[in-house]
Amino acid sequence: MPTPRLSVVIPTRNRAEDLRACLAGLIPQLPESAQLTVANDGSTDHTQEVLDSFPGIEVLSLSGAGASAARNDGLTVSTGEIILFLDDDVVATPGLVERHLAFHSHNPAVGSALVGLVTWDPRRKITGHMVWLEDGGPLFSFNTITDPTSVDPRHFCTANVSVKRDLLDRVSGPFNVHLPRFTDVELAFRLAEVGMKLSYDEDAVGWHLRADTPASTDERMFVVGQASVLLEEIHPGMAPEAASLGAVRHAKVLVAKALTPICEVLPTRLAGRVWAARAAWAYAAGREDAIRANGNRV
């Protein structure tokens, strides 16, 4: 079967060294016919210097409208039949591009899409908290996939996913620029409504360069909770449910925060319960904050 032409779209903002590692891992894998577009979303660091050191990249200079707008703008100049979305802090391990292209060569239907594994960079320190995040916590959850040929849209992850251009053209946007979070999932459900069948390849691996702590997870989950209110208005029933912010829950999170400094030496299951209590509280608190800001409308 002929190999379809590939376009890669990477949004970036103020992650110059991560972007350097991303491009260094990706570019040697690209076939000559591939198109690579980096949407530089108002970076103020030395991102442009990094981009200048990699000839052949199509660079879009944007004004800081956010990752969703950057992906949309990158898509407007992409001419490939297959669009591969990567994040600027993800390193494509050897074979990632080849596996995405092989999948689409063998699955030419417009709706066929492939998500690859995103996991922590093994060359960096991986804490127990980070392991929990992708194995029971609110991040990635690729380990819960039971049938790699029929994957729930909630696993659609634009850090490492490829989609037919014709499928993306069936929906508006395609990324919703008004959502600060849930953009992957929101798009995935709209794509599923117009025929997407998502598959998963655990060997198309992207190494995530980010590091997370309980505090950074709390901050992210608070924003996720805020965004869930808007998601609920757009797609009722899509946002995860939030725990009650009652006195018992408050007491639990206070205990969890007190135990956090020793979690890395606690038994895995107990540590996971501590981190989960914190994340659940942060999500619920963010949701309550947004509801108050919206005049108690959900």
Image: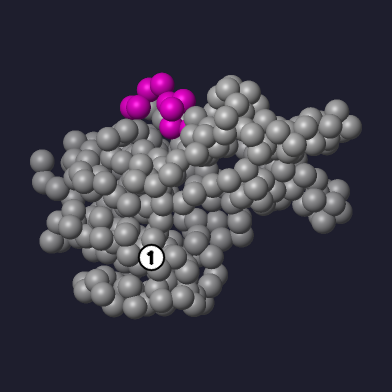
Q: Which residue is mark 1?
A: 17
Magenta span includes 143? yes
Residue 211 or 173: which is nearer the viewer? 211
Residue extending furthest right?
247
Image quadrant for the N terminus? Answer: top left
Label 1 environment density (alpha carbons within 10 Å; few <14, some 14–19, many ≥20): some
The amino acid on which the numbered mark 1 sits, given as a three-letter code, is: Glu
Is disc 1 placed on a helix, strand or loop? Answer: helix
Q: Main secondary structure of the magenta part?
A: loop
298 versus 176 height, above or below: above
183 versus 241 height, above or below: below
In the image: residue 190, left or right of residue 151: right
Residue 13 can be seen in this image: yes
In this picture, which residue range is highlighted in magenta?
141-149
Residue under the point 80% across and 36% down: 254
Residue under the point 54% across and 47% down: 212
Residue 72 or 292: which is nearer the viewer? 292
Q: In the rendering, at what x and y percent does residue 3 appear?
A: 14, 48
In the image: residue 282, left or right of residue 55: right
Image quadrant where residue 50 sits: bottom left
Residue under the point 35% across and 42% down: 122
Image quadrant where residue 24 sits: bottom left
Residue 28 or 195: which is nearer the viewer? 28
Q: In the rendering, at what x and y percent does residue 84 appear?
A: 32, 52
Image quadrant for the C terminus? Answer: top right
Residue extending furthest left?
1
In the rendered picture of this protein, how many numbered marks are placed on residues? 1
Q: In the rendering, at what x and y percent does residue 39 appear?
A: 40, 69
